[in-house]
Image (cartoon, coloured by chain):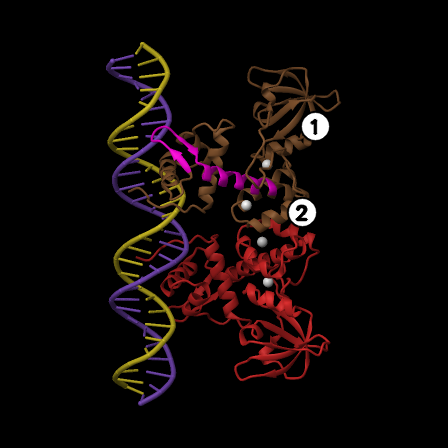
Chain colours: A brown, B red, C yellow, D purple
Amino acid sequence: MANRQLNPNSESTDNYLKAILALGGPEESRVTSNALARHLDVAPASITNMLQKLAAASTPLVEYERHHGVQLSPSGKKRALEVVRHHRLIETFLYEVLDYPIEEVHEEAERLEHFISERFEQRIAAKLGYPKIDPHGHCIPAMSGRMPKQSSMLLTEAALKTNVLVESVSDRDAGTLKLLKASGIGPGVQIRLQERTPASRCTVVVGRSSKMLELPENIAHSIRVRPLDK
Amino acid sequence: MANRQLNPNSESTDNYLKAILALGGPEESRVTSNALARHLDVAPASITNMLQKLAAASTPLVEYERHHGVQLSPSGKKRALEVVRHHRLIETFLYEVLDYPIEEVHEEAERLEHFISERFEQRIAAKLGYPKIDPHGHCIPAMSGRMPKQSSMLLTEAALKTNVLVESVSDRDAGTLKLLKASGIGPGVQIRLQERTPASRCTVVVGRSSKMLELPENIAHSIRVRPLDK
DNA sequence: CACGACGTTTAGGCATACCTAAATATTAGG
DNA sequence: CCTAATATTTAGGTATGCCTAAACGTCGTG
Ligand SMILES: [Mn+2]
Ligand SMILES: [Mn+2]
Ligand SMILES: [Mn+2]
Ligand SMILES: [Mn+2]
């Protein structure tokens, strides 16, 4: 039998909303069960069940149409952005105040984001001087829930032989972050794409050096850049 | 039917172990189901079920004898002390670094104590200079799990007209803490018990002032003191 | 030493979020 | 426009921690 009830304050609910926000992209397009199943590492059938509960809650958190995926409702989006704000504030705090290595902030934030109070959020934001971006270069949603659009592109899509700035690096894989740190690549660093294989293997120059660095596809894919000028 | 399985890493498990540690007292005496039911605000039947699972776990966390209460096993005690260490370090951190008002640290610590990593524990301990007592005056167990015995007594049991030092105040009720703060009573403050009614209502003098302060029984009961000298 | 009050345990069940297997809907290719 | 591949949903079930009601044990008092 299907489950009937949702705990709208559970860690699980938070994670579904965050995933829908992330997978929907800036256009907030509908997200499929399968994509969620992959992202959350949960069986597709479990996703369907949860989506139905998210949609049927007394204040519905998603708009769900059978066989056609989901979108966040206004309340759902509000909560999703709040959790992202928690996540990125916590990451910044761990990095700036507790001197975590960059590659370890994500995992801790991923847990704590669901359990901190509004007061905790406020106090770390104040302590950090109300930061706007986290240590990976991701933008921190405002308390109001507003989050500016980023106009960056993947390194794998950048023009060849043009200087660009690293805007952000993905926080999801610790190994990748360690490697990037060792290579001197991080938010704010200038790089130039020298060459790109069909399989998205990228050769780059970091900073003003002349050394070439070859990045496998998965690493290159974790870097977002924007034009130098403006 | 009885439940068969325990999640030894759950928040619930942590809370049972902490409660058994607290209720067992310094002599680590056996704790009854009823006492736990009251302390944790859970039905007695649920307590029995959980105790059986704690005792039957692959590494048993309690020693349980039907109708005769429980004691912590060595592993159970280890985990209980670790959670207490987390709790008190977090309280100290919230108070010292994030400027929480004393009466709000407990609630936040009560949640977060279950979710922080060993690294987080280490880093806040380092940041705070490896503190030995929390803002309520409670002693913080060492990483090894060692915790010195406190040789204090309740204010309600102190000798009359003798100067004593406040060693600690209970962290459990925010209202009480606010009142104590307003009265200038906190760890390290010198007070003198002037008078005590049969119902444990206490009249005290705080510090070197000459003002009398009358404390109702529940407030007086939340204060532990020790002799001035030594 | 028997009884009753009280504490404890057993029995049965619910809530939430997950699972697998089977059924069904969508959609792309012929 | 039909069909096969694929995506999604339904059905039935598990895990963990909680509940109430009923049965049972312990222990102090008469
Ligand atoms: Mn918040
Ligand atoms: Mn990040
Ligand atoms: Mn620890
Ligand atoms: Mn405390």
10 Å neighbourhood of mark 2: few (<14), some, or many (≥20)?
some
Q: Is residue B168 above or below residue B99?
A: below
Give the image quarter of residue A50.
top left
Hey, what amino acid is under mark 1?
Val
Residue beneath the point at 56% across and 79% down: B201
Is residue A65 on the magenta stretch? yes
Measured from the top left, where is residue A6 in percent x and y? Answer: 38, 45
Q: Label 1 lies in what chain?
A: A
Residue A63 appears left or right of A150: left
Residue for badge 2: A127
Give the image quarter of residue B152.
bottom right
Q: Label 2 lies in what chain?
A: A
- The span picked out in magenta is A62-89
Residue B224 appears left or right of B210: left
Q: Which of these two is toward me, B131 or A182?
A: B131
How many callouts does the rendering have?
2
Measured from the top left, where is residue B66 in percent x and y? Answer: 37, 68
Q: Tell me the SS state at disc 1.
A: loop
Residue for badge 1: A189
Hey, what amino acid is under mark 2?
Lys
Residue beneath the point at 56% across and 43% down: A86
Q: Is residue A160 above or below residue B120?
A: above
Q: Tell me the SS state at disc 2.
A: helix
Residue beneath the point at 44% across and 55% down: B58
Ligand 1 quadrant? top right
